[in-house]
């Protein structure tokens, strides 16, 4: 296949991909994003295996924001479009748009990636892989800048999660989609029945490995504005693993 900057892939939403409302699970959507990002990178010649063999690095998702206009449903087919933006010194930005089969936009997302040395577990400059694109696309799926998320000073513990085999990916740490499940489990089932997620933004800060215990906290200070802050910490609260901001209807 000829290398392209704008990459498209069709997905069928199976029963295993939805929640009790038959809506596409947010964690599965993140898995779709990871899948198409991998396929698009392979198409451009910078896939996972190539980066490992040539540069001993791998792709790591650092920040992402997803705005949901309409939830895809069970048994529907969707098309995800993704494209990279021109990289800066450290980050590789990648945007996404999810459409139904009539071309209507259902979801928009923007993300920021880095490359990490597999042996040293340290981040590398973007120019280490010498990436280039057939076309530089400047259009953004969401007109925003991904920044650092902060709580409002009123964190309360929700639950703890022990990281096991089913949580880790090929990089040996928690897959980003698993964090989304952890975040969604901070909400009671009744909340999921009565509300829907309009937007979610996540900062992935530190690795979590098998055997780690992550303590999930939330801050409800801004709940009147339908905004909930969630944070995962490990090592007896000494290390922040991720921060998230969820906007509900």
Image (spheres, rainbow, N blue to C red):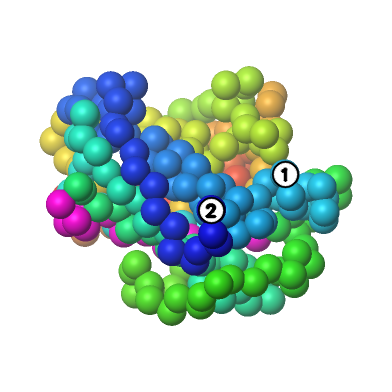
Count of numbered circles on the image: 2
Q: Nearer the viewer, residue 227 or 125?
A: 125
Q: Residues within 10 Å of mark 1 (few under 14, many from 20)?
A: some
Instruction: Residue at 40%, 37% (x, y): give it.
Output: 27
Left or right: residue 63 versus residue 143 is right
Instruction: Residue at 30%, 33% (x, y): give it.
Output: 12
Which one is closest to the eye, mark 2 or mark 1? 2
Q: CA distance from mark 2 to mark 1?
A: 18 Å
Whether pointer 2 and pointer 1 mark residues with C-beta atoms closer than 8 Å, the reply is: no
Q: Where is residue 129 shown, x and y percent of the image?
A: 75, 64
Instruction: Residue at 22%, 23% (x, y): give it.
Output: 20
Left or right: residue 12 versus residue 35 is left
Q: Which numbered dot is residue 1?
A: 2
The answer to whether any part of residue 247 appears in the image is: no
Q: Which residues are magenta?
A: 102-114
The relative height of residue 166 versus residue 114 in the rendered view (above or below) is above
Q: Element type at marker 1? A: helix
| Dot placed on the residue nearer the N-terminal end, 2 or 1 | 2
Q: Where is residue 189 shown, x and y percent of the image?
A: 24, 26
Left or right: residue 194 versus residue 140 is left
Residue 87, magenta (yes or no): no
Q: Element type at marker 2? A: loop
**In which image quadrant can residue 107 be found?**
bottom left
Considering every residue shown, the one lying at the far right of the view is: 119
Q: Nearer the viewer, residue 22 or 12?
A: 12
**In which image quadrant can residue 17 be found?**
top left
Residue 103, magenta (yes or no): yes
Considering every residue shown, the one lying at the far front of the view is: 1
User: Which residue, given by chain and number where applicable, does mark 1 sit on?
Assistant: 49
Q: Nearer the viewer, residue 150 or 146?
A: 146
The relative height of residue 44 versus residue 101 in the rendered view (above or below) is below
């Amino acid at each position: 296949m000829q290398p392209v900057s704008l990459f498209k892939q069709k997905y069928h939403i199976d029963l295993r991909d939805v929640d009790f409302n038959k809506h596409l699970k947010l964690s599965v959507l993140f898995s779709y994003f990871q899948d198409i990002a991998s396929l698009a990178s392979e198409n451009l010649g910078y896939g996972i295996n190539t980066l490992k063999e040539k540069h001993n690095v791998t792709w790591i998702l650092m920040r992402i924001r997803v705005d949901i206009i309409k939830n895809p449903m069970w048994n529907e087919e969707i098309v995800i479009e993704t494209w990279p933006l021109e990289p800066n010194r450290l980050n590789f930005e990648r945007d996404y748009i999810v459409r139904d089969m009539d071309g209507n936009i259902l979801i928009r997302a923007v993300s920021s990636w880095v490359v990490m040395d597999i042996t040293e577990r340290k981040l590398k400059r973007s120019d280490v892989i010498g990436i280039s694109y057939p076309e530089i696309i400047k259009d953004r799926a969401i007109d925003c800048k991904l920044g650092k998320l902060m709580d409002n000073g009123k964190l309360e513990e929700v639950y703890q999660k022990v990281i096991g085999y089913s949580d880790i990916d090929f990089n040996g740490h928690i897959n980003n989609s698993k964090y989304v499940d952890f975040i969604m489990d901070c909400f009671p089932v009744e909340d999921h029945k009565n509300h829907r997620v309009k937007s979610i933004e996540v900062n992935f800060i530190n690795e979590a490995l098998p055997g780690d215990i992550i303590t999930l906290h939330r801050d409800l200070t801004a709940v009147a504005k339908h905004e909930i802050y969630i944070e995962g910490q490990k090592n007896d609260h000494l290390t922040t693993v991720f921060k998230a901001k969820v906007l509900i209807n």
